[in-house]
Image (tube, coloured by chain):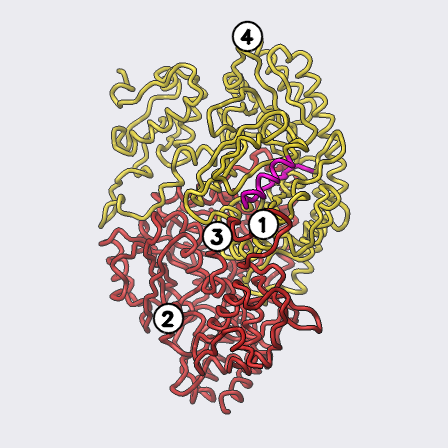
Chain colours: A yellow, B red
Amino acid sequence: MDWLFEVGIERPEKGARDATRRIDAQLRAAIADGRLAPGVRLPATRQAAAAFGVSRNTAVEVYDRLLHDGYVVARQGAGTFVAERPPAAGAVIDEGAPAAERPLNPFWLRPEVSDAIGFWRSSGDDPHADAPAVELRPALVDGRLFPHDVFRRIMAQQLRALERSPPSYRGPQGNQGNGRLRAAITRHIAVTRAVACQPEDVIVVAGAQQAFDLLARSLIDRPGAVVAFEDPGYPPMRAAFAAAGAVLHPTPVDAEGLIVECLPDAARIVCLCPSHQFPLGVSLSPARRRALLAWARRRGAVIVEDDYDGEFRYAGSPLEALRAGGTDIVFYVGTFSKCMLPSLRLGFLVAPEWARPTLVAAKNALDWHCPILLQTAVAAFIAEGRLTRHVRRMRQVYRRRRDLLLERLSGDLSPWLEPIPSSYGMHLAALARPGVDADAAADVLARRGVRLHSLERYHLGPPTSRGLVFGFGAADEAQIERGLDLLHETLRR
Amino acid sequence: MDWLFEVGIERPEKGARDATRRIDAQLRAAIADGRLAPGVRLPATRQAAAAFGVSRNTAVEVYDRLLHDGYVVARQGAGTFVAERPPAAGAVIDEGAPAAERPLNPFWLRPEVSDAIGFWRSSGDDPHADAPAVELRPALVDGRLFPHDVFRRIMAQQLRALERSPPSYRGPQGNQGNGRLRAAITRHIAVTRAVACQPEDVIVVAGAQQAFDLLARSLIDRPGAVVAFEDPGYPPMRAAFAAAGAVLHPTPVDAEGLIVECLPDAARIVCLCPSHQFPLGVSLSPARRRALLAWARRRGAVIVEDDYDGEFRYAGSPLEALRAGGTDIVFYVGTFSKCMLPSLRLGFLVAPEWARPTLVAAKNALDWHCPILLQTAVAAFIAEGRLTRHVRRMRQVYRRRRDLLLERLSGDLSPWLEPIPSSYGMHLAALARPGVDADAAADVLARRGVRLHSLERYHLGPPTSRGLVFGFGAADEAQIERGLDLLHETLRR
């Protein structure tokens, strides 16, 4: 049976970079219009891979996305079946009007949006598996080294304080965030990032992602507003702005960071990671900083500075945050997900005065404020000097891991990969030398229990860089060695 | 000096119901266009009150809103001054383009939006004051009676568990919420609200307010979509839908709840509190339930059921949640802010399958997921039977307070107020008898340290009901007596 032919799906070109997306989009369309009817059994991933001419891992990735978004269901031991009520189909309902009439914003199920939100998933990601043998994805942290005992004590203290003066009299009314936390953040970033601000400039948010969402809803003043992003960049940030109606403009990056000359005239908002480009790891050069600030001022544009791991600097004098050059046009986004724990869901936004009432109103209308207990616990953690101590310790740990990684990349891995210099953070990128298929290497490694990203998933526009991203936030030195050994084996074939 | 004349501001009609809003809007306009220039000192509240012909409290309320939104600044001992860089003014900036060109969504500073978000503020609210003598605002809870010691123990357990298996390997990727919590929620609402669902139907959100925001962003499929709300109703819920581009349609309420015959044909989304109307307290009658469900089915419309305090039932057999009549068209919103603590910022949404992938995607793109620690702590709290025990205990406490309130309202306060029957929750409303100025009474009481709301602030359309809302979630019986004594004194004059 030529299954593809029957269903009217095209096999992507061999080696097409966006094969996963194209197969996924076609299957969704076939399910939505009924060519694949509810209850129909999809071929096993091995056969699907053969039919599409892709790796089995790619087929697994596609099925996983369809499962996650409700298009198919998996039945233990029986296989994968089209869902009875897939999202975009005119499903039969109990009584009354057909589902097609129901109010539903189609934005959230667009493949590119699912891609951006599912960004962290790696090939062969099994949500039921234990931690993989080696975790080399970027932007993860080593929870094993966090001072949990200290945090536990602090939380207990804060719970007692909560008991003594319950905040319930304030009702759910909104605010910018706990005063002590905002003061602690102010002191923290003054020291680590040379950001000079006052506590009233700080808004506490539920992580950097919520900061992006609030900025999008506060700064996009009409549908179709153009927002420029670094490309390759960070897809979840783009999704937040797209949700608010922005048109996303991918802007290239080179060794000096964002190429300011390539910014579109129409853009009024530029988003970037100036201290540690994500994922390439380069820092915005002083010349580009000046050019970017001048460019923004000439146009009345604003800049969103995503400084997710700026505390972790390894070489050279610390770069001032971009904000120092434009406190009235730069929105500085910070997070506790890297220097503390991502599970806390806490971050902050330092905003110019003219935008602050708008941002605070948007935050209040969204979810009032962040949980008081976590805010006061983090404030106390910082005030006791624990954050400084933890960052200092982790900087040493991450530096050793980074040095190990660079040694291998410049050593036995250098025939295939060229590291991009980076003085910050818990990841670095390596470009693939000509003829090296980085995406396939990542797929193979995933099957062998090593999770890492290739650069492909970070691009909005055509993939201009090919290579791999190495996160060393989660894996220890032994795990890194093991992962790189497997990478070496894989690349040799 | 006729200050008003000089600035070109009109004194509102004597006794105008929306005097606060009109004065506020005019002052903002005068500041925005420079008639009140940066640095200019506003008259003291006493003089402003005399000039506008309103109570001093109203003047204080207006100044407080201008302060909160950044239009004015207060200098200790010196007075209130127009801000150097008020939000909408063409403020002078360091260099470059005028502020008027900067991207800023004006939605969040509209007076009606500020009103909705500032909903919880009461007249004379001084953010620096201690808890008032008597707190009679609705939707607050008595934190003094929460089992903090139990919660502290549970949190410590969860922190230890977090330490043993750090979730960092999952990165910030999104999900519907902690599995144990969703299972616990499922069991909890099955017992308390006869909601039959599965854990996979539940999405954990940052409180009911975030549920409204996610619903608005997931269900509004085009700008100008009509959404019907109960009027009087809950302003923060309306703000979330307005932010997503909805046109708000206020729909009247009577003793049987929402008047279904008055729903606009164009509406595809209806939001209501069927078990305990907010603020009037009535329950949707069985006849209206059937009518509403039939109305929605005929049109392919959906219903948002806000069940904020449905556990607290005092008389009669429990009403099934509205959802029981339409699991495919009703979105059930629940919260832990009333049955536990508002500072946790945790709630949940039970959604039909066809909308769930969209809602989960929107939640993930917004802030990934709620803090893991709080989710697992609440899950354990529920699993240990502590929530059931706490609700049972609080139900007794609140019932006694409610009975006391009803006694006074039917007794010495009955010449001026008529209570609206209500079998649920921690507040009830009383209509003002003819000739009784409820708004003025609330103002006077606020000055005397008793915080309570009049019905005026709950209306979107013209105020059809005049009266007072009595919350008894926060105040104990002695405080309630004292507040009612002061009310009696006030009304007698």
* Residue at x-position 52% and y-position 17%: A444
Same subunit, tags 4 and 1: yes
Q: Look at label 1 and name its amino acid.
A: Val
Viewer-proximal residue among B338 and B295 = B295
Q: Look at label 2 and name its amino acid.
A: Val
Chain at tag 3: B
Q: CA distance from mark 4 to mark 2?
A: 73 Å
Give the secondary structure at mark 1: strand
Residue at numbered disc 3: B105
Residue at numbered disc 4: A493
Q: Nearer the viewer, mark 4 or mark 1?
A: 1
Which of the marked residues, 4 or 1, is nearer the chain's N terminus? Answer: 1
Report the residue that reaches farthest toward the bottom: B493
**Is residue A480 shown left or right of residue A117?**
right
Residue at numbered disc 2: B282
Q: Nearer the viewer, mark 4 or mark 2?
A: 4
Same subunit, tags 1 and 3: no
Asked if residue A307 is among those painted magenta in the image, a careful observer would answer: yes
* Residue at x-position 63% and y-position 38%: A308
Same subunit, tags 2 and 3: yes
Asked if residue A23 is among those painted magenta in the image, a careful observer would answer: no
Q: Nearer the viewer, mark 4 or mark 3?
A: 3
Q: CA distance from mark 2 to mark 3?
A: 37 Å
Q: CA distance from mark 4 to mark 1?
A: 47 Å
